[in-house]
């Protein structure tokens, strides 16, 4: 009997003490809570020298006992004609939130530095012991947040949510919320100075004002432990509660109604067994309504119940073999002006593109995407790979860098741990092997499993060739021993010879684990046609797909792929005039969604794989309906 590595949606419920110490992140499940939107036009000040943050001795104003009114976060007006204040939010231009600044003003297209945002708002109605929070979906990269001149705190990392409690800090009217957003790149940051995507700055996701009871459910996890027995377990974290607070979990479609009491840390644990569960899958993405109630608080949500596991070289969803018909995706949508995805509608459009390709899986590269797309994937039955931006060559020796990466990992898992669509947490992309890197990623893998044993762990590794055989490709990396799925990027036919090389290459991958090819591809300018041996043409890209897919079918344990990439995207590395023009052209679609020839090559391959997931597929065109 082969060893089964199980990663179940919530299979292991850790003791309260372990969970609290391992998390080190205060997750707030805020998406479904009623809120006052602070989205819209914000007043902004561009501050390339950070004059609003530092004095001329480079001393931060917000670390002074009495910050001067010249600090931008004070949002001051001259009190008399003789007072010198060298900024004025009221007279400033505006930028939209949520959005990046790069695509809103041509002068900011390449801008890296500080922009100050200000929003004025009135306090919501608060009764009794109710509490108030300001919640940010994300801001890239560092955000320093101030309310009425008082610093609430800061957040580092451009793709995960954060929040501040402002109970008792709001005025009835004309509150001033100021955010200093800085997207400068740093060697010790995550990601580091060198990437292959646009460094969009700004408050890129929604800002919301949330009012809760004094005691409320801040976080929870509900999980299927065993698809054969219907065992379900989970927990609720009640903010403001000590021991003995009753929490009620209801899932009416399963006739489930459980009660539990919190321990001294405010954690209430649940465990039961349910019959008649309809398990979540791409062909049947069943979602169950859920409510958690305590005192006067009620948190409503919906969850899918499924298991994901490996057995030797097989990938198993709810105990059945699975082939991942995937595609990679950046969080960029150029149809309506470009830049970061700004809404659920844009996220849905991206997933509809993937569905039209026949995909059942999307690799969200190279950072956590917006919560809209993750929840839509739940509803549409699209499985996901979610990743943190430990990308290329970060500062493996720096403990500060590690703690940054661990925090981003914890925030990603904290936000999305109840989303059935996510089956893989990815630790890194194309990182060079070294002792320091191996230690760094081992610590991240340990953290990921401590936070969530319900999903598989992977990372996008790289290949090399045997020294005496240039046609024997090898994937051998200490990281492969840590992960559940051996995933790697390869670009035979683009950065490695021409596409005909794929006909001759064989593979040695010495692991009894599923094999997933997380990237392959070639650049093509949409509309540029020629023969299949001419670079940058749709014809070359299509032929590379045909040959690559045939090559991948020869790999033992091949369980899927997510070619690079669904749509062309911005990158400052891609400057070839007339072809790239600041776009990475490896998309199967242009940046505005126009198909290239390779789109149909992959679609035909996936149509055949959908019919026979376990069998190699020809890349010849076949007719017929696609199955789930």
Image (spheres, helix red, strand yellow):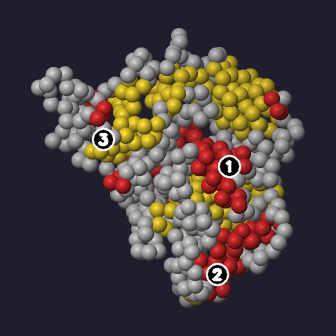
**In 3D space, how far apart are the residues under numbered discs 2 and 3 (Cα atoms)?**
49 Å
Number of numbered markers:
3
User: In this rendering, would 399 be left or right of 323?
Assistant: left
Q: Is residue 142 left or right of residue 552?
A: left
Of the image marks 2 and 3, the number of the one nearer the N terminus: 3
At a point 26% along the width and 48% down the height, the residue shown is 48
Instruction: From the top left corner, tell me how far across and down residue 99 is, in percent.
Output: 46, 46
Task: Judge depth for marks 1 and 3 and give the one in front.
Answer: 3
Q: Are marks 2 and 3 in contact (CB under 8 Å)?
A: no
In the image, residue 195 above or below residue 443: below
Q: Would you say the residues marked 2 and 1 are in contact, meaning their CB atoms lie under 8 Å apart?
A: no
Q: Residue placed at 50% from the left, 38% from the top?
A: 206
| Image quarter hosting the C terminus | bottom right
User: Looking at the picture, how far across and down is residue 325, in whole percent?
Assistant: 71, 63
Q: Which residue is mark 2?
A: 543
Front position in the image: 180 or 407? 180
Front in this rendered view, residue 75 or 130: 75
Which numbered disc covers residue 377? 1
Q: Residues within 10 Å of mark 2 (few under 14, many from 20)?
A: many
- Say what secondary structure mark 3 lies in: strand
Q: Upstream in the sequence, badge 1 or badge 3?
A: 3
Q: Which residue is mark 3?
A: 45
* Residue positioned 72% across, 23% down in the render: 248
> Left or right: 205 with respect to 275?
left
């Amino acid at each position: 009997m082969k060893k089964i590595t199980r990663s179940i949606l919530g299979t292991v419920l850790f003791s309260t003490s372990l969970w609290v110490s391992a998390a080190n992140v205060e997750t707030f499940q805020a998406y479904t809570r009623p809120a006052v939107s602070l989205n819209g036009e914000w007043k902004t000040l561009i501050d390339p020298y950070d004059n609003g943050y530092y004095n001329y001795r480079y001393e931060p104003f917000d670390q002074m006992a009495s910050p001067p009114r010249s600090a931008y976060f004070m949002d001051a007006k001259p009190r008399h004609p003789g007072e010198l204040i060298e900024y004025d939010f009221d007279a400033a231009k505006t930028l939209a939130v949520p959005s990046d600044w790069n695509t809103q003003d041509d002068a900011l297209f390449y801008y890296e530095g500080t922009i100050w945002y200000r929003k004025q708002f009135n306090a919501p109605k608060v009764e009794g012991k109710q509490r108030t929070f300001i919640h940010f979906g994300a801001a890239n990269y560092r955000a320093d947040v101030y309310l009425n001149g008082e610093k609430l705190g800061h957040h580092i990392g451009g793709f995960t949510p954060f929040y501040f409690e402002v109970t008792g800090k709001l005025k009835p009217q004309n509150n001033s919320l100021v955010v200093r957003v800085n997207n400068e790149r740093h060697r010790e940051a995550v990601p580091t100075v060198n990437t292959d995507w646009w460094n969009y700055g700004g408050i890129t996701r929604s800002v919301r004002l949330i009012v809760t009871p004094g005691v409320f459910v801040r976080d929870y996890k509900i999980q299927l432990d065993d698809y054969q027995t219907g065992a379900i377990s989970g927990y609720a974290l009640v903010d403001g509660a000590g021991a003995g607070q009753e929490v009620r979990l209801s899932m009416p479609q399963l006739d489930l109604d459980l009660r539990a009491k919190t321990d001294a840390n405010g954690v209430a644990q649940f465990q039961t067994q349910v019959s008649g569960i309809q398990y979540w899958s791409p062909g049947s993405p069943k979602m169950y309504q859920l409510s958690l109630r305590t005192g006067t608080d009620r948190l409503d949500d919906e969850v899918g119940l499924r298991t994901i596991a490996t057995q030797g070289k097989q990938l198993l969803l709810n105990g059945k073999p699975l082939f991942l018909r995937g595609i990679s995706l950046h969080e960029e949508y150029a149809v309506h002006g470009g830049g970061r995805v700004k809404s659920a509608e844009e996220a849905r459009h991206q997933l509809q593109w993937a569905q039209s390709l026949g995909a059942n899986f999307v690799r969200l590269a190279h950072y956590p995407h917006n919560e809209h797309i993750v929840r839509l994937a739940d509803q549409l039955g699209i499985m996901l790979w979610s990743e943190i931006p430990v990308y290329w060559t970060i500062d493996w020796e720096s403990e500060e860098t590690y703690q940054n990466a661990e925090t981003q990992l914890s925030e990603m898992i904290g936000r999305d741990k109840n989303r059935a669509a996510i089956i893989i947490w990815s630790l890194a992309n194309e990182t060079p092997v070294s002792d320091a890197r191996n230690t760094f990623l081992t610590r991240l893998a340990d953290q990921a499993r401590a936070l969530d044993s319900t999903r598989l762990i992977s990372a996008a590794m790289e290949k090399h060739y045997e020294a005496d055989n240039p046609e024997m490709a090898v994937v051998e990396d200490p990281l492969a021993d840590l992960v559940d799925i051996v995933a790697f990027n390869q670009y035979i036919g683009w950065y490695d010879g021409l596409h005909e090389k794929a006909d001759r290459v064989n593979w040695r991958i010495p692991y009894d684990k599923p094999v997933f090819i997380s990237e392959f591809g070639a650049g093509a300018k949409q509309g540029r046609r020629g023969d299949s041996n001419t670079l940058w043409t749709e014809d070359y890209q299509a032929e590379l797909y045909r040959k690559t897919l045939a090559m991948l079918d020869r790999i033992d344990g091949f369980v899927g792929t997510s070619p690079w990439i669904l749509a062309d995207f911005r990158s400052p590395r891609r400057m070839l005039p007339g072809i790239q023009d600041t776009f990475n052209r490896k998309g199967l679609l242009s940046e505005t969604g126009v198909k290239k020839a390779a789109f149909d090559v992959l679609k035909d391959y996936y149509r055949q794989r959908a019919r026979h997931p376990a069998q190699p597929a020809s890349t010849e065109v076949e007719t017929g309906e696609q199955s789930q």
